[in-house]
Image (cartoon, grey):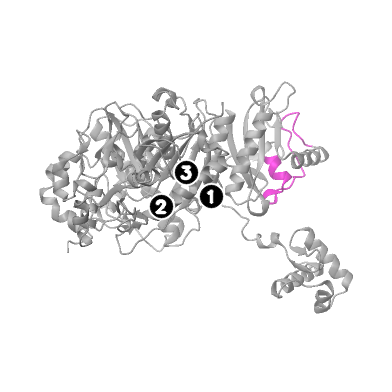
């Protein structure tokens, strides 16, 4: 019998990847392609959905070729995607009605401001505060922007979706227009209790029902691909952060992980009960296996972490590659009194201040680029601390270790800083690419490639661990400084 | 201050000439332009060719700048970048071998551990990134020495860590020759009694070795009944090294 494999498509903010995994959840091959970022105005961030689909078509054969695997050896394909990024396309031609508007985009701030007075009900239904971050306001903005678009959508000529919906529609040759509950739970249009579209929320945002995809469990049946992976079953789709939670095998209530990528996202599995947030965290769906009740999660979302390093590299040009931030930061022993709060698109959890903008404070003539590099890394550490504090207060659980993953876990200095400021050990599993792994696990589970959750859990091993080693007095003083720096970002953008 | 070395000045002049010219240049052309004897010029060109700074066209016999010269300024790879680029392949190596994985580069005559993946058995282990190991007594170090990564050279005084440590210059040279022939290095109880390791070279552009990746653990797990590293482990290590090298732009 020939060995079988599972393929994950990780459609991320900066790139798309196809990764082939074996039965032990180990990476066999990886093909990756970056896509263009469009920033047409300050606060705007767009992607070309067609470019992303073409990348998937190109990456699929490349990943299989590198692994030496044929299509009939692929048991299933699973999708993990950047969440809240939204696109509208023509049902008949498949051509997008404009660029996809990404999760980092803040163009809907005045729309959100205008809608905010009557949003209490919708927040209660969706489990989310009304923010530019989510897809609902974005869809409304798109429909308002182009004359005639709303009418065409109402006539059923247009379809909309987040990136997994767009990819599945293309993978199945336009036969399936579906979303999964985790992605749907980030639109503000889903009733987070019943897990179906809420008429009240849809009417609130003025979205024609006809353009919305069907909501399905994350792990189950999304059809069979006719393109990119012809003949292969699409077993799962999950938002990238939920996929990482799944890839870290956080299957029971109380288990948490933090993924360090463009942004960073701490998710705590709260089990089949929805825990309402009162500390600036989000209530969201963790995953749903077809035929079973959904598992929920509390989420602490940090908008800017890895992208601050990218900014340091691309906009300030102080380093030539992202990992060099560690080399530069190690040229000094502390931050020299300098703090960077990267409120580039406002602050997310636990503050949720869309009018905040970034600051660099504590500048003196003593400060070198080494101090700035340290402040860049520390910003990720302190933002994690704020979210963990909120999570502990909200859940009543004290986090005793933090499972971490994502590209930034290659940065040893950063990992040590996070362990230091949280005062708990950090553990990295034997798979940094947990987003892709989670999508692969979910898809493999859907088709019986893996028998059950316990089987997946046995694949999880510790690959690295960082122990806290910071003086408590210094920790307290630095945290106080950080909080003062954060306050200085507030109220920067004045309502027009 | 000692005087300048004439032949190096002449070599530099030849390189400048090849860099400034329109394409390939012939031996007599170079000799004439620099007012040197043909024999002297030929000797310098052959030496430059030996280190890869100059290449000779087979049909015309003319000379041009070599590929090694072009990579001279770009061969350095930041250690944190090396870790970042290899992390995805070090994890499967630990999973496939069941052993701890380390990646090393050369720092001031020693092996600097730049990445460490725990042995995947969930026992308590400590990250030893930043630790320094001896070049001549470890599999990682012998790979780095064999391919002269980062200018690694054999020290004059070699410490014996165990009775198995290679401290004789001749036996170490022979050992390094064997590493180059096999494409991997092993250390069996050469640093610590009861411990063994296998390592292979990580290559960058042009095949230049910039680091080494390897597994280590107890002799009874890493070696077969003949006290030799298990073939399966060697395959795993070499596959991981090749995958990283491919990502770093090495062509083979």
Protein chain holding label 2: A
- The answer to if B132 sits in the magenta stretch is no
Q: Which residue is mark 3?
A: A18
Protein chain holding label 1: B
**In terms of image quadrants, where is residue A150?**
bottom left
On residue A52, the disc is 2
Q: Earlier in the sequence, mark 2 or mark 3?
A: 3
On residue A271, the disc is none
* Residue that protrudes farthest toward the left in the picture: A118
Q: Position of residue B105 (x, y in %)?
A: 62, 45
Q: Which residue is mark 1?
A: B81
Any part of residue A337 in sight: no
- Say whether mark 1 and mark 3 are on the same chain: no
Task: For mark 3, give the secondary structure.
Answer: strand
Q: CA distance from mark 2 to mark 3?
A: 12 Å
Q: Is residue B36 left or right of residue A310?
A: right
**Labels 2 & 1 near each other (Cβ < 8 A):** no
The residue range painted magenta reads B141-167
């Amino acid at each position: 019998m020939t060995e079988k494999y599972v393929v994950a498509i990780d459609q991320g903010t900066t790139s798309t990847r196809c990764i082939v995994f074996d039965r032990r959840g180990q990476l066999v091959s990886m093909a990756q392609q970056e896509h263009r970022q469009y920033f047409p105005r300050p606060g705007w961030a767009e992607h070309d959905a067609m470019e992303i689909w073409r990348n998937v078509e190109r990456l699929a054969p490349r990943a299989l070729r590198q692994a030496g695997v044929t299509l009939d050896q692929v048991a299933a394909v699973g999708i993990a995607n950047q969440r809240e990024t939204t696109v509208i396309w023509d049902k008949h031609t498949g051509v997008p009605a404009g660029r996809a508007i990404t999760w980092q985009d803040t163009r809907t701030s005045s729309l959100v401001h205008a809608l905010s007075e009557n949003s209490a009900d919708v927040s209660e239904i969706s489990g989310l505060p009304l923010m530019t971050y989510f897809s609902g306001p974005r869809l409304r903005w798109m429909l308002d922007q182009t004359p005639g678009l709303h009418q065409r959508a109402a006539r059923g000529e247009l379809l909309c979706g987040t990136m997994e919906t767009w990819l599945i529609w293309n993978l199945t040759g336009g036969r399936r227009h579906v979303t999964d509950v985790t992605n749907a739970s980030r639109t503000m249009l889903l009733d987070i209790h019943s897990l179906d579209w809420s008429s009240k929320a849809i009417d609130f945002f003025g979205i024609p029902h006809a353009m919305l995809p069907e909501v399905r469990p994350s792990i189950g049946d999304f059809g069979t691909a006719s393109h990119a992976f012809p003949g292969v079953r699409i077993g799962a789709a999950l938002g990238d952060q939920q996929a990482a939670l799944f890839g870290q095998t956080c299957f029971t209530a109380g288990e948490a992980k933090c993924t360090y990528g463009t942004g960073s996202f701490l998710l705590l599995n709260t089990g089949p009960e929805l825990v309402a947030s009162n500390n600036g965290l989000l209530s969201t769906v963790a995953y749903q296996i077809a035929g079973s009740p959904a598992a929920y999660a509390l989420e602490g979302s940090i908008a800017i972490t890895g992208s601050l390093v990218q900014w340091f590299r691309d906009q300030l040009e102080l380093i030539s590659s992202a990992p060099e931030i560690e080399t530069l930061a190690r040229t000094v022993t502390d931050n020299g009194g300098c703090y960077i709060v990267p409120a580039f698109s406002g602050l997310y959890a636990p503050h949720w201040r869309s009018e905040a903008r970034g600051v660099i404070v504590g500048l003196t003539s003593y400060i070198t680029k080494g101090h700035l590099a340290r402040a860049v890394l520390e910003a990720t550490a302190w933002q994690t601390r704020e979210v963990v504090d909120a999570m502990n207060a909200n859940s009543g659980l004290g986090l005793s270790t933090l499972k971490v993953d994502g590209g930034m876990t290659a940065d040893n200095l950063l990992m040590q800083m996070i362990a230091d400021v949280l005062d708990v050990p950090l553990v990295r599993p034997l798979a940094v690419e947990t987003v892709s792994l989670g999508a692969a696990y979910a898809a493999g589970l859907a088709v019986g490639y893996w028998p059950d959750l316990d089987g997946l859990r046995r694949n999880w091993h510790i690959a690295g661990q960082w122990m806290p080693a910071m003086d408590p007095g210094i920790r307290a003083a630095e945290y106080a400084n950080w909080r003062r720096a954060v306050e200085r970002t507030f109220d920067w953008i004045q309502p027009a | 201050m000692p005087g300048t070395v004439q032949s190096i000045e002449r070599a530099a002049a030849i390189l400048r000439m090849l860099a400034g010219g329109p394409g390939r240049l012939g031996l007599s052309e170079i000799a004439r332009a620099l007012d040197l004897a043909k024999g002297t010029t030929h000797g310098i060109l052959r030496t430059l060719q030996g280190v890869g700074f100059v290449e000779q066209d087979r049909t015309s016999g003319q000379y041009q700048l070599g590929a090694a010269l072009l990579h001279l300024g770009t061969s350095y790879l930041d250690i944190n970048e090396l870790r970042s680029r290899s992390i995805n392949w070090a994890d499967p190596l630990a999973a496939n071998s069941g052993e701890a994985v380390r990646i090393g580069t050369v720092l001031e005559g020693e092996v600097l551990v730049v990445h460490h993946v725990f042995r995947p058995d969930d026992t308590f282990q400590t990250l030893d990134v930043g630790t320094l190991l001896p070049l001549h007594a470890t599999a990682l170090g012998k790979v780095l020495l064999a391919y002269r990564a980062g200018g690694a050279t054999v020290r004059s005084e070699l410490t014996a860590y165990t009775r198995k440590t290679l401290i004789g210059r001749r036996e170490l040279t022979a050992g390094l020759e064997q590493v180059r022939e096999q494409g991997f290095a092993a250390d069996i109880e050469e640093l610590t009694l009861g411990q063994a390791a296998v390592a292979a070279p990580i290559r960058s552009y042009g095949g230049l070795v910039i680091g080494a990746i390897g597994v280590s653990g107890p002799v009874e797990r890493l070696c077969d009944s003949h006290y030799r590293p298990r073939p399966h482990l060697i395959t795993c290590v070499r596959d991981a090294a090749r995958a990283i090298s491919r990502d770093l732009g090495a062509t083979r």
